[in-house]
Every structure is written in structure tokens, then in C-alpha cells.
Image (cartoon, rainbow, N blue to C red):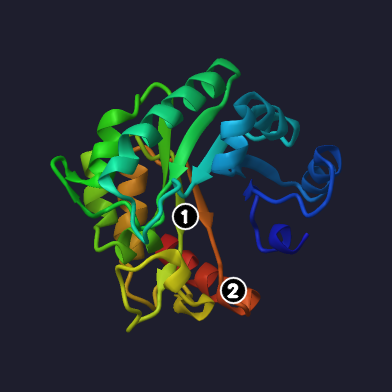
């Protein structure tokens, strides 16, 4: 109800907060919302990708989003990439056959050098575009010293989903998500992420759904400010 009052009509689901899929779907419909995508853990997909698809379908989602390839160090190791790509291709094939699209969500740990450029470039190279797509999170892309606009242009159509959030000025970049404090997520337009160019590039290169993601403890005031920023962009 809160986000519906702010003008949102689509959302990305993850944890159902102890509710059944039927109860969660009713909450969405009662508030005029549609869950177009649903997060799923690596372990859940590994255990039973078809069961994940069933859960996504039960709440009306058509995208299943997996984040964080298992890795022992802070960043994804080169040896982690081929088996991860193989797993994503397998799960993506299963999900595609059931009418869903699998996306991998970037978290900024995939950009160490590789023979293809970065380990993310290698992951893109090894995943079949017919079965595996990606969700760009512009916060984590910049956190990994990358340019969202350049990545979107390099891989048009591979990012149907985008998370939009900004990084507080002065935040130390290049670590892992565990190093980032909640207060380092700031209202759009007040941090170091070039949000407007990323949004424009997303529209040009195949992003279909944009999600405002807010991780600050005091979320609502920041959401209001971010919506004000977006409204100014549309003016």
C-alpha cells in the first residue's frame, strides 16, 4: 500500500515474509501491483529450478533473478566463472522451457581482470543469451569501477532489468557488498552515480523494467527524494 501510494505499479519480489504465494499475490493485487520479477538464491536454483519457476509463476513474475555466484574470496575468482556459467545456462534452459527468463544480478565483485576484459565479460561470453540475461545494478557497477552506460552499449539486450540507486560521495569502492554500510545508499542525484545517463542508456539498449532500490535504514525519506529527482528528469 505504501509503495502503491507513491505511484509504483510494478515491483520485484524476493522474500515473501512468511506468507504463502497466494497471500502475497493477493497483497499485490489488492494494491494494484504486479511483481514482474522474483529473486531466488543460488542454492534454491541448484536444488530445483523448476520449483523456483513455480513459485515465481504463483506470484505472477516472469523473471527469476539470481545474485552472488558462490566464491571463497571477496571477488569472483577466474576459476569460479566457467562452472557458474554452466549452472546458469542449465537453469536458464529449464526456466525458459517453463516460460521464465533467468537473470544474474551484478554485485560489483565480477570485474577483476580476465583474458576477455573482466570476469564479467567472460561470464557474458560463456552464458547463452537465449537462456541467461542480466540485471544491472548501477550502484554495484560503479562500485566495481565500471561504467553502466558503456556496459549497456557493449551488451545491448542482455540487461532487461535494472536496479537504480546512488552511492554516497566518499564511499570506498572496489570491495564486496559486505563492506558497504546501509547509509552509503543515498537519494538519486546526490551521490557519485551518473543516474540520468544510465537511465537513458537503459532505454536505448533494452532495459524493460527499472526498479528503485532503497537500502538505507530511513528508507521512506530517501525514496521521496529519489522520486522527486526522477520527476525532475521527466519534466
Q: Is residue 197 above or below residue 62?
A: below
Residues at marks 1 and 2, CA–CA distance in whole angstroms: 17 Å
- Say whether residue 156 is visible: no
Please tell me the numbered disc located at residue 163: 1
Image-based side of 25 in relation to 159, left or right: right
Please tell me the numbered disc located at residue 12: none
Q: Are marks 1 and 2 in contact (CB under 8 Å)?
A: no
Query: Residue 38 versus residue 176: which sits nearer the camera?
Result: 176
x then y, percent, for residue 200? 33, 52
x then y, percent, for residue 113? 18, 52
Tell me the crowding category of disc 2: few under 14, some 14 to 19, or many 20 or more residues within 10 angstroms, Cα based: some
Q: Is residue 158 above or below residue 227?
A: above
As drawn, the residue found furthest toward the top would be 97
As drawn, the residue found furthest toward the front would be 72
Q: Nearer the viewer, mark 1 or mark 2?
A: 1
- Say whether residue 22 is visible: yes
Q: Residue at x 38, y 40 (%)?
A: 159
Image-based side of 205 in relation to 36, left or right: left
Residue, disc 2: 224
Query: Residue 9 versus residue 112: which sits nearer the camera?
Result: 112
Q: Residue at x 67, y 34 (%)?
A: 56
The quadrant of the image that shows the N terminus is bottom right
x then y, percent, for residue 93? 48, 20
Tell me the crowding category of disc 1: few under 14, some 14 to 19, or many 20 or more residues within 10 angstroms, Cα based: many
x then y, percent, for residue 193? 33, 68
Q: Secondary structure at mark 2?
A: helix
Amino acid at each position: 500500500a505504501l509503495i502503491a501510494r507513491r505511484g509504483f505499479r510494478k515491483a520485484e519480489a524476493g522474500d515473501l515474509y512468511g506468507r504463502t504465494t497466494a497471500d502475497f499475490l493477493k497483497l499485490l493485487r489488492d494494491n494494484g501491483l504486479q511483481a514482474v520479477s522474483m529473486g531466488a538464491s543460488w542454492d534454491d536454483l541448484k536444488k530445483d529450478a523448476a520449483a523456483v519457476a513455480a513459485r515465481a509463476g504463483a506470484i505472477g513474475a516472469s523473471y527469476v533473478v539470481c545474485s552472488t555466484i558462490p566464491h571463497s574470496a571477496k571477488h569472483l575468482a577466474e576459476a569460479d566463472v566457467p562452472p557458474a556459467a554452466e549452472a546458469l545456462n542449465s537453469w536458464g534452459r529449464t526456466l525458459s522451457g517453463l516460460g521464465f527468463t533467468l537473470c544474474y544480478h551484478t554485485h560489483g565483485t565480477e570485474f577483476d581482470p580476465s583474458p576477455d576484459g573482466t570476469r564479467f565479460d567472460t561470464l557474458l561470453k560463456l552464458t547463452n543469451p537465449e537462456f541467461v540475461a542480466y540485471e544491472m545494478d548501477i550502484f554495484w557497477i560503479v562500485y566495481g569501477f565500471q561504467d553502466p552506460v558503456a556496459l549497456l552499449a557493449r551488451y545491448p539486450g542482455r540487461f532487461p532489468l535494472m536496479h537504480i540507486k546512488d552511492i554516497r560521495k566518499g564511499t570506498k569502492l572496489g570491495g564486496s557488498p559486505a563492506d558497504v554500510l546501509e547509509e552509503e545508499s543515498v537519494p538519486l542525484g546526490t551521490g557519485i552515480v551518473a543516474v540520468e545517463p544510465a537511465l537513458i542508456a537503459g532505454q536505448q539498449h533494452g532495459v524493460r523494467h527499472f526498479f528503485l532500490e532503497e537500502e538505507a535504514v530511513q528508507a521512506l525519506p530517501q525514496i521521496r527524494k529519489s522520486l522527486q529527482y526522477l520527476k525532475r528528469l521527466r519534466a
